[in-house]
Image: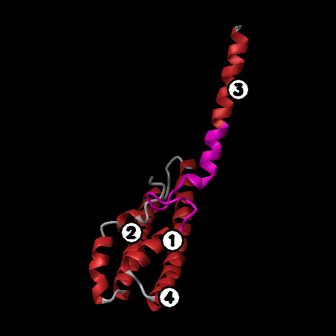
Amino acid sequence: MSKIRLLGIAVGFLLVLNLVILFLLVNEKGRVPFPGMPEHDREHPKRIIIEQLDFDKDQVMQYEKLIQEHRRAVTELEGQIRETKKNLYLTLRDQKQTGRDSLENRLGDLQKLMEAVHYNHFAAIRNLCKPAQLQHFDVLTRELAFFFVPGKK
């Protein structure tokens, strides 16, 4: 096999490899919102909570409202985080990187707000529980940290 042919095969292989990697980066199907959960199953944490806490119909309806509020708040914060990150990386154009510190601080503040949104969401779920369900909620709290770990498998 000639060196040119071998080089052509290597270049072709690297091109295909780059396209596969690019596809995986653009396509977020690799993200799993909850360990052990299929990526298409956003309802899995909801089902876990309803089942483990044995919510009745009224509690499920109240829980659905909490979920809507939570998703709205998370979506809003995610948008702010994306915009702040975009602005942060735009400072790379500037030799002095003007505003970098304030943007990094803003990102920290937004992440802190995100954690507060998650925490308050679960505190509200706890408030939905009847006294007999609180013991089950306490068991569930051991798993809560994994509910919002993006990309964790």
Residue bearing mark 4: 61
Percent across and percent down for residue 147 are 42, 66
Q: Which residues are magenta?
A: 19-43
Residue bearing mark 2: 112
Question: Which label's residue is closer to the chain start, 1 or 4?
Answer: 4
CB contact under 8 Å: marks 3 and 1: no
Question: Which label's residue is closer to the chain start, 4 or 3?
Answer: 3
Amino acid type at mark 4: Met
Residue bearing mark 3: 12
Name the image quarter holding residue 118. Answer: bottom left
Q: Of the residues tagged 1 and 4, which is closer to the observer? A: 4
Name the image quarter holding residue 146. Answer: bottom left
Residue 13 shows which numbered tag? none
In the image, residue 69 sits, relative to residue 141, either above or below, namely below
**Residue reaching furthest bottom?**
58
Amino acid type at mark 3: Gly
Residue bearing mark 1: 77
